[in-house]
Image (spheres, rainbow, N blue to C red):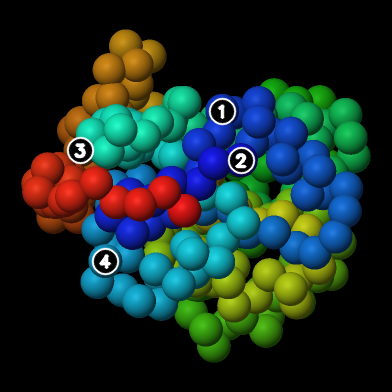
Amino acid sequence: MTRIEILGVPVDAVTEPQALEWAVQALANGRPRQVATVNPEFVMRARRDPEFAAALRRADLCLPDGAGLLWAARRQQQSLPSRIAGVDFVRALARAGATRGWRFFLLGAEPGVAEAAGLALCREYPGLQVAGTLAGSPDVAMDPVTVGAVRGSRADILLVAYGAPAQDLWIARNLPATGARLAIGVGGALDFIAGRTRRAPRWMQDRGLEWLHRLAQQPWRWRRMLALPHFVMRVMVERRPSRT
Ligand code: UDP
Protein backbone atom coordinates (compact mmCIF):
# COMPACT_ATOMS: atom_id res chain seq x y z
CA MET A 1 0.00 0.00 0.00
CA THR A 2 1.40 3.38 -0.99
CA ARG A 3 1.08 6.17 1.53
CA ILE A 4 1.47 9.71 0.26
CA GLU A 5 1.40 12.99 2.14
CA ILE A 6 -0.83 15.94 1.42
CA LEU A 7 0.52 19.03 3.23
CA GLY A 8 2.14 16.72 5.77
CA VAL A 9 -0.92 14.55 6.41
CA PRO A 10 -0.76 10.85 5.43
CA VAL A 11 -3.25 9.54 2.87
CA ASP A 12 -3.26 5.97 1.57
CA ALA A 13 -3.51 5.32 -2.17
CA VAL A 14 -6.15 2.59 -2.03
CA THR A 15 -9.32 1.69 -3.86
CA GLU A 16 -12.40 0.66 -1.90
CA PRO A 17 -11.91 -3.07 -2.65
CA GLN A 18 -8.29 -2.81 -1.45
CA ALA A 19 -9.37 -1.02 1.73
CA LEU A 20 -11.98 -3.69 2.36
CA GLU A 21 -9.43 -6.46 1.83
CA TRP A 22 -7.12 -4.66 4.26
CA ALA A 23 -9.97 -4.61 6.82
CA VAL A 24 -10.60 -8.34 6.36
CA GLN A 25 -6.93 -9.03 7.10
CA ALA A 26 -6.89 -6.60 10.03
CA LEU A 27 -9.89 -8.30 11.61
CA ALA A 28 -8.40 -11.73 11.10
CA ASN A 29 -5.23 -11.07 13.01
CA GLY A 30 -3.46 -9.09 15.60
CA ARG A 31 -3.59 -5.72 17.20
CA PRO A 32 -6.40 -3.16 17.02
CA ARG A 33 -6.28 -0.84 14.01
CA GLN A 34 -7.43 2.75 13.56
CA VAL A 35 -8.91 4.08 10.32
CA ALA A 36 -9.30 7.79 9.53
CA THR A 37 -11.40 9.26 6.72
CA VAL A 38 -9.19 12.16 5.68
CA ASN A 39 -10.55 15.17 3.80
CA PRO A 40 -9.21 18.70 3.19
CA GLU A 41 -10.82 19.95 6.43
CA PHE A 42 -8.78 17.30 8.31
CA VAL A 43 -5.60 18.44 6.57
CA MET A 44 -6.08 22.09 7.46
CA ARG A 45 -7.04 21.24 11.04
CA ALA A 46 -4.01 18.97 11.46
CA ARG A 47 -1.72 21.83 10.41
CA ARG A 48 -2.68 23.80 13.52
CA ASP A 49 -3.48 20.92 15.89
CA PRO A 50 -0.41 18.79 16.73
CA GLU A 51 -2.43 16.24 18.72
CA PHE A 52 -4.74 15.62 15.76
CA ALA A 53 -1.77 15.51 13.36
CA ALA A 54 -0.10 12.89 15.58
CA ALA A 55 -3.28 10.78 15.71
CA LEU A 56 -3.50 10.81 11.90
CA ARG A 57 0.19 9.87 11.62
CA ARG A 58 -0.38 6.90 13.90
CA ALA A 59 -3.57 5.77 12.12
CA ASP A 60 -3.17 2.44 10.34
CA LEU A 61 -5.28 3.42 7.33
CA CYS A 62 -6.01 6.95 6.10
CA LEU A 63 -8.76 6.80 3.50
CA PRO A 64 -8.89 9.57 0.87
CA ASP A 65 -12.36 10.94 1.67
CA GLY A 66 -12.36 14.12 -0.37
CA ALA A 67 -12.12 15.02 -4.06
CA GLY A 68 -9.74 17.84 -3.10
CA LEU A 69 -7.17 15.28 -1.97
CA LEU A 70 -7.15 13.63 -5.41
CA TRP A 71 -6.61 17.01 -7.02
CA ALA A 72 -3.81 17.86 -4.57
CA ALA A 73 -2.11 14.50 -5.21
CA ARG A 74 -2.18 15.11 -8.98
CA ARG A 75 -0.59 18.52 -8.49
CA GLN A 76 2.32 16.85 -6.69
CA GLN A 77 2.69 14.28 -9.51
CA GLN A 78 1.37 11.58 -7.26
CA SER A 79 -1.89 9.77 -7.46
CA LEU A 80 -4.77 8.56 -5.36
CA PRO A 81 -6.87 6.03 -7.27
CA SER A 82 -10.29 7.13 -6.05
CA ARG A 83 -12.19 8.95 -3.38
CA ILE A 84 -13.61 6.68 -0.69
CA ALA A 85 -16.42 8.37 1.22
CA GLY A 86 -16.60 7.23 4.85
CA VAL A 87 -20.27 6.31 4.50
CA ASP A 88 -19.54 4.15 1.43
CA PHE A 89 -16.79 2.33 3.31
CA VAL A 90 -19.14 1.73 6.26
CA ARG A 91 -21.65 0.15 3.89
CA ALA A 92 -18.93 -1.99 2.26
CA LEU A 93 -17.88 -3.19 5.72
CA ALA A 94 -21.50 -3.90 6.67
CA ARG A 95 -22.04 -5.92 3.49
CA ALA A 96 -18.87 -7.94 4.13
CA GLY A 97 -19.55 -8.24 7.85
CA ALA A 98 -23.09 -9.52 7.46
CA THR A 99 -21.79 -12.80 6.06
CA ARG A 100 -18.71 -12.99 8.27
CA GLY A 101 -20.32 -12.49 11.67
CA TRP A 102 -18.46 -9.26 12.47
CA ARG A 103 -20.04 -7.43 15.41
CA PHE A 104 -20.52 -3.66 14.90
CA PHE A 105 -20.82 -0.97 17.56
CA LEU A 106 -22.16 2.44 16.48
CA LEU A 107 -20.99 5.26 18.73
CA GLY A 108 -21.83 8.96 18.55
CA ALA A 109 -24.19 11.32 16.71
CA GLU A 110 -27.31 12.83 18.26
CA PRO A 111 -29.30 10.61 20.65
CA GLY A 112 -31.27 8.02 18.69
CA VAL A 113 -29.28 8.37 15.46
CA ALA A 114 -26.83 5.52 16.06
CA GLU A 115 -29.74 3.24 16.93
CA ALA A 116 -31.66 4.27 13.80
CA ALA A 117 -28.52 3.80 11.68
CA GLY A 118 -28.03 0.33 13.18
CA LEU A 119 -31.60 -0.65 12.29
CA ALA A 120 -31.19 0.74 8.76
CA LEU A 121 -27.95 -1.22 8.25
CA CYS A 122 -29.63 -4.42 9.48
CA ARG A 123 -32.43 -3.87 6.95
CA GLU A 124 -29.95 -3.22 4.15
CA TYR A 125 -27.65 -6.13 5.07
CA PRO A 126 -29.66 -8.97 6.60
CA GLY A 127 -27.65 -10.99 9.07
CA LEU A 128 -25.61 -7.99 10.21
CA GLN A 129 -24.82 -8.08 13.92
CA VAL A 130 -25.14 -4.77 15.72
CA ALA A 131 -23.52 -5.39 19.09
CA GLY A 132 -24.55 -2.00 20.49
CA THR A 133 -25.32 1.65 19.86
CA LEU A 134 -24.70 4.69 22.04
CA ALA A 135 -24.70 8.46 21.50
CA GLY A 136 -22.27 8.89 24.39
CA SER A 137 -19.99 11.92 24.43
CA PRO A 138 -16.49 12.66 23.12
CA ASP A 139 -15.70 14.27 26.50
CA VAL A 140 -12.66 12.59 28.11
CA ALA A 141 -14.51 12.40 31.43
CA MET A 142 -17.02 10.04 29.80
CA ASP A 143 -14.37 7.66 28.42
CA PRO A 144 -14.63 5.02 31.17
CA VAL A 145 -18.40 4.67 30.73
CA THR A 146 -18.25 4.58 26.94
CA VAL A 147 -15.30 2.18 26.83
CA GLY A 148 -17.15 -0.09 29.26
CA ALA A 149 -20.20 -0.16 26.97
CA VAL A 150 -18.14 -1.04 23.89
CA ARG A 151 -16.06 -3.64 25.72
CA GLY A 152 -19.18 -5.23 27.20
CA SER A 153 -20.71 -5.58 23.72
CA ARG A 154 -17.74 -7.63 22.45
CA ALA A 155 -17.75 -5.61 19.24
CA ASP A 156 -15.22 -6.27 16.48
CA ILE A 157 -15.74 -3.03 14.57
CA LEU A 158 -16.35 0.32 16.20
CA LEU A 159 -17.79 3.22 14.18
CA VAL A 160 -17.21 6.55 15.94
CA ALA A 161 -19.28 9.55 14.81
CA TYR A 162 -18.10 12.55 16.83
CA GLY A 163 -16.77 14.56 13.88
CA ALA A 164 -13.08 15.38 13.48
CA PRO A 165 -10.87 15.72 15.42
CA ALA A 166 -12.88 14.45 18.44
CA GLN A 167 -13.66 11.04 16.94
CA ASP A 168 -10.08 10.35 15.88
CA LEU A 169 -8.68 11.46 19.23
CA TRP A 170 -11.29 9.33 20.99
CA ILE A 171 -10.13 6.27 19.05
CA ALA A 172 -6.43 7.05 19.61
CA ARG A 173 -7.07 7.29 23.38
CA ASN A 174 -9.40 4.36 23.86
CA LEU A 175 -9.18 1.78 21.12
CA PRO A 176 -6.99 -0.78 22.94
CA ALA A 177 -9.29 -0.72 25.98
CA THR A 178 -12.46 -1.32 23.96
CA GLY A 179 -11.51 -4.79 22.78
CA ALA A 180 -12.55 -3.85 19.21
CA ARG A 181 -10.09 -4.76 16.46
CA LEU A 182 -11.02 -2.02 14.02
CA ALA A 183 -12.23 1.50 14.77
CA ILE A 184 -13.16 4.14 12.23
CA GLY A 185 -13.94 7.82 12.61
CA VAL A 186 -16.98 8.12 10.37
CA GLY A 187 -18.05 11.79 10.69
CA GLY A 188 -21.61 12.31 9.52
CA ALA A 189 -22.02 8.76 8.16
CA LEU A 190 -24.54 7.67 10.80
CA ASP A 191 -26.70 10.72 9.99
CA PHE A 192 -26.70 9.69 6.32
CA ILE A 193 -27.47 6.03 7.05
CA ALA A 194 -30.23 6.94 9.51
CA GLY A 195 -31.74 9.24 6.88
CA ARG A 196 -31.25 12.41 8.98
CA THR A 197 -29.21 14.04 6.21
CA ARG A 198 -29.24 13.36 2.48
CA ARG A 199 -26.20 12.68 0.37
CA ALA A 200 -25.46 14.71 -2.74
CA PRO A 201 -26.84 13.26 -5.99
CA ARG A 202 -24.51 10.98 -7.88
CA TRP A 203 -23.62 13.60 -10.53
CA MET A 204 -22.41 15.97 -7.79
CA GLN A 205 -20.40 13.23 -6.09
CA ASP A 206 -18.80 12.32 -9.42
CA ARG A 207 -17.83 15.94 -10.07
CA GLY A 208 -16.25 16.43 -6.64
CA LEU A 209 -19.12 18.69 -5.52
CA GLU A 210 -20.38 16.80 -2.47
CA TRP A 211 -19.04 19.63 -0.26
CA LEU A 212 -21.33 22.10 -2.08
CA HIS A 213 -24.38 19.96 -1.42
CA ARG A 214 -23.41 19.72 2.24
CA LEU A 215 -23.03 23.46 2.46
CA ALA A 216 -26.47 23.98 0.86
CA GLN A 217 -28.06 21.51 3.32
CA GLN A 218 -26.19 22.72 6.39
CA PRO A 219 -25.31 26.40 5.78
CA TRP A 220 -23.99 26.76 9.35
CA ARG A 221 -20.97 24.82 8.08
CA TRP A 222 -19.70 27.81 6.08
CA ARG A 223 -17.12 28.85 8.63
CA ARG A 224 -15.63 25.36 8.92
CA MET A 225 -15.73 24.98 5.18
CA LEU A 226 -13.50 28.00 4.68
CA ALA A 227 -10.85 25.31 5.18
CA LEU A 228 -11.51 24.31 1.55
CA PRO A 229 -10.32 27.50 -0.21
CA HIS A 230 -7.46 27.70 2.29
CA PHE A 231 -6.54 24.13 1.38
CA VAL A 232 -6.57 24.95 -2.34
CA MET A 233 -4.37 28.01 -1.82
CA ARG A 234 -1.94 26.11 0.39
CA VAL A 235 -1.58 23.29 -2.14
CA MET A 236 -1.02 25.81 -4.95
CA VAL A 237 1.92 27.45 -3.16
CA GLU A 238 3.42 24.26 -1.75
CA ARG A 239 6.50 22.74 -3.32
CA ARG A 240 6.38 19.08 -4.30
CA PRO A 241 6.66 17.12 -1.02
CA SER A 242 8.53 13.86 -0.64
CA ARG A 243 6.98 10.42 -0.86
CA THR A 244 6.94 8.48 2.44
N1 UDP B 1 -21.26 14.75 17.09
C1 UDP B 1 -21.51 14.20 18.34
N2 UDP B 1 -21.04 14.82 19.47
C2 UDP B 1 -20.33 15.96 19.39
C3 UDP B 1 -20.05 16.52 18.12
C4 UDP B 1 -20.53 15.89 16.98
O1 UDP B 1 -22.13 13.14 18.43
O2 UDP B 1 -19.93 16.48 20.43
C5 UDP B 1 -21.73 14.07 15.89
C6 UDP B 1 -22.77 14.78 15.04
O3 UDP B 1 -24.06 14.58 15.58
C7 UDP B 1 -22.60 14.05 13.71
C8 UDP B 1 -21.15 13.59 13.75
O4 UDP B 1 -20.65 13.93 15.02
O5 UDP B 1 -23.39 12.90 13.66
C9 UDP B 1 -20.27 14.15 12.70
O6 UDP B 1 -20.44 15.50 12.55
P1 UDP B 1 -20.04 16.23 11.20
O7 UDP B 1 -21.09 15.99 10.19
O8 UDP B 1 -19.76 17.64 11.59
O9 UDP B 1 -18.68 15.49 10.82
P2 UDP B 1 -17.87 15.50 9.47
O10 UDP B 1 -18.51 14.46 8.59
O11 UDP B 1 -17.93 16.88 8.89
O12 UDP B 1 -16.51 15.10 9.96
Bin the neighbour count of mark 3 within 10 Å (Cα to Cα): few under 14, some 14-19, many 20 and up: few
Residue 193: x percent and y percent?
54, 35
Q: Which residue is mark 1?
A: 15
**Helix, strand or loop at disc 4?**
helix
**Helix, strand or loop at disc 2?**
loop
Among numbered discs 4 and 3, the one appearing first in the sequence: 4
**Helix, strand or loop at disc 3?**
helix
Mark 2 → mark 1, Cα distance in angstroms? 10 Å
Mark 4 → mark 3, Cα distance in angstroms? 23 Å
Q: Which residue is mark 2?
A: 1
What amino acid is at disc 3?
Leu
Mark 1 → mark 3, Cα distance in angstroms? 26 Å
* Residue 117, above or below 79: below
What amino acid is at disc 2?
Met
Residue 102: x percent and y percent?
84, 44
Q: Residue at x 29, y 51 (%)?
A: 241
**Helix, strand or loop at disc 1?**
loop
Residue 71's mark? none
Bin the neighbour count of mark 2 within 10 Å (Cα to Cα): few under 14, some 14-19, many 20 and up: few
Label 2 beta carbon within 8 A of ligand 1: no
Q: Nearer the viewer, mark 4 or mark 2?
A: 2
Mark 2 → mark 3, Cα distance in angstroms? 33 Å
Q: Which residue is mark 3?
A: 215
